[in-house]
Image (cartoon, grey):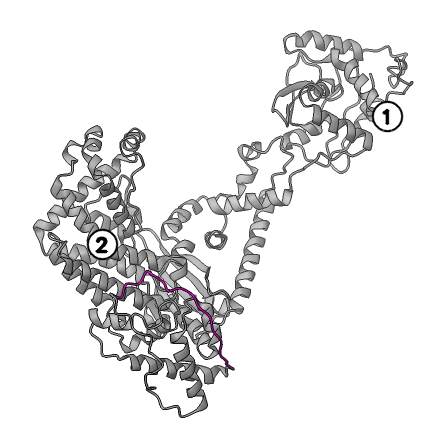
Amino acid sequence: MLSIENASDESCLKTEAEDCSDLEVDPLNWEQQQNNLVQTYNMDHDQDVKVVWEKGDGIPKRKRPSYEEAEDMVGYDLPLEVAVARREFNTSYTRGKMYAPKRKRHASGESKLPEIFRYFGNIEHVADYNVKPGAVSATCNACHARIKGFTKVTSNFIKHLRLKHFEIHAEFVNAKQTGNAEVPETPDTDSFDNRVVSYVIDAALPLDTVEKPSFRSMFEGTHLTVMSRDKLEMLLDDHFNKMQKNIKMLIANQKYICTTADLWSTRERSYFGYTCHWLDKNYKSKSAALACKLLPKELTTEHISAMISRINTEYELNNLKIVANATDNCANYAKLIKSFGIKMQHSLSELESEAVTLPNNLLPNPIQCASHTLSLVASIDYMQLLDEDPSLKQRHVTIFEKCSALWQKFSCPKSNDIITNVLGEALITPTLSRWNSIYDAICCILMHKEKLSELCSKLSLHNSCFSPNDIQYLEEYRLVMTPIASTIDFLQMESNLYYGCLIPALTSLCIKLKRISDAGEVIDLRNILTALQLKLKARFAKYLTLADDAHNAIIASVLCPSVKMRWFNALARVSVHQRRAEDVHKLIISEAMRHAKAAEHCYNLAAASQKKDDFYDFDDIETSDLDASQPSPIAPATKLAEDVEAQLQNYLQDAGTGFEVLQKYTLLHDLGLKYNTPLSSSAPVERLLSFMHIIRYSKEQDLCDYPFEKLVLMRANSK
């Protein structure tokens, strides 16, 4: 029999495959073939075991290496399964006369097998006392077929490649001829390790997951090496350190930062989240999560203050760089959903949380999340107004209970199929953390109102059928809530996170609600709508009255190129305030002069143009952006004041609506960047540190042996 290791050309290999074809193991005649193989190996002791063939047509005489020599000829760089690598293949055969030395272990610890096994995985010893030692079974990497053979007689494995995978067999032949022992396209171990790290981070898995047999078995036969637990921990630490270093570099390169600090408390635990946000060179909002800690239930102000101070010190944040600190006004939405008459199938108790209000002295320049405040208007304030009309509230609860019964059916696979068949699509159901989801779910029901009778009948919801009066109420509810929901969505868009979008968006919302009220389309909820507008103005009083403590928001609005002064006259129609356009003009000039003196800016002028944003509705009474023909409210006492006023006038008349337009007005550019860095919405915070995800993570972390905070931050900052 020809040895692959000593074959000099492809014809020799072909001859060997043909000569060995009669040795292919037949599963139906396994024992008989074993006896034949035993006879092959039971040679006369007078004959030198090292010479087992010396003739053949067209084949030069060659010397067959001994078993001991043959096994040392090929070494493997690719790892075998742990169980295979540790296995001793016993080549002694006690029932016959054949004897071969035991396999030698190399000092390097590498397992030595014939080269053909590079194309097979999951190599296992055949544990049967009737089977000759050295018998193995292996899985073909190409087709996953299970092939039986021997570690010394590999003809079955060679024949399988020759008959089933011609190209792979040709690669094998070529590799033997050229001496190239590498299998083509070996997967990148580093890339594989990084994917395992990402998987562990995303699922908050215990680190010993990578050492579980069930996990390792998924990669058998792939030539991939699953790392050890210790290596995984080292890679996680390295990943976290690199992430933290990158965040510190990003923060160091920013002039202005907005931070958010939020404290949630559930029945079991308290959580503290801390993030930062800035505008990049393209004026896009960027974010990073800096801390997410599990805290004891009882906390003191001193403890929280010290914690914030440590985080700021670690990331070199100070009050000059931090222009605002935002909180998200997190409400107990689980209790709110109950009050709406909505029943969820799973328990809400674990999601009932309370937002802990942080003292203002802990957070310099505090601001509240506008989108969350709007959600409070549409939920808590709305339910409080319903309490004043018991009959209307009972009607509301009854209708929402019917909606809830329909939403609960969605979780049943059989009912879900019925819903999809009748409606042609799935239902939208509420989530526990967003008021918008209730609004979206109601809109979905109304979209299919003609099919509700058929749907309720097929779902056996005979007591939950919607009457025409029910549909009328839901239609009015949607009409009242649509401006609020669209404003929340607008403020949460990536392109509208600037603080300067807040006052114009609130102005537009007030105008839209007033228009609905004046139109007389709302009947059942007419009084509710009127009172709801007052609730809205009360919650946003400082912005809608242009109070002194809203100066930052006013400056941000004027220096937000998409709106400038378009909102000013419209605001006077829906809210009483004592400001004149000249007062706003004076405020901007004074702040720009102060800022320019502090920063010692150089400045010059240029020009550009873009479109206006069409979201804002100012009822056709837009302000003319302070026409330059108006007299200046400030006497130009200095050259700086003269230049500031000139730049402001030119800016207000500039048709450009993108932030890059500010680059032409150097005395206004840095000021606009500073005052528009604060967030108008906490949407970036929710994307980084979703409260729902934190709860899930903390539960999974109970089973994990790696720090909770590191896992949360790595997951948050990988988005």
- 327 in the magenta segment: no
Q: Residues within 10 Å of mark 2 (few under 14, many from 20)?
A: some
Q: What amino acid is labelled 1 in the image?
A: Ser
Q: Is residue 443 visible?
A: yes
Q: Is residue 204 visible?
A: no
Q: Which mark is residue 179?
A: none
The answer to whether residue 333 is above or below residue 572 is above
Nearest to N terminus: mark 1 or mark 2: 1
Image location (x, y in percent) of residue 115: 75, 28
Give the residue drawn at x 82%, y 26%.
5
Q: Quick one: 307 or 339, which is closer to the camera?
A: 339
Position of the N terminus, as image quadrant, is top right
In the structure shown, which secondary structural element does the residue marked by tag 2 occupy? helix
In the structure shown, which secondary structural element does the residue marked by tag 1 occupy? loop
Q: Which residue is mark 1?
A: 8
Image location (x, y in percent) of residue 68: 82, 25
Q: Residues within 10 Å of mark 1 (few under 14, many from 20)?
A: few
Q: Which residue is mark 2?
A: 481
Query: Distance of mark 1 from mark 2, alpha carbons?
Result: 83 Å
Residue 675 in the figure: left or right of residue 390: right
Residue 94 in the figure: left or right of residue 672: right
Image location (x, y in percent) of residue 97: 79, 11
Which tag is nearer the camera, tag 1 or tag 2? Answer: 2
Q: Are marks 1 and 2 in contact (CB under 8 Å)?
A: no
Magenta region: 602-618
Residue 198 in the figure: left or right of residue 527: right
Image location (x, y in percent) of residue 52: 86, 15
Predominant secondary structure, magenta span: loop
Q: Quick one: 302 or 194, which is closer to the camera?
A: 194
Question: Which residue occupies the extreme front position in the image?
Answer: 629
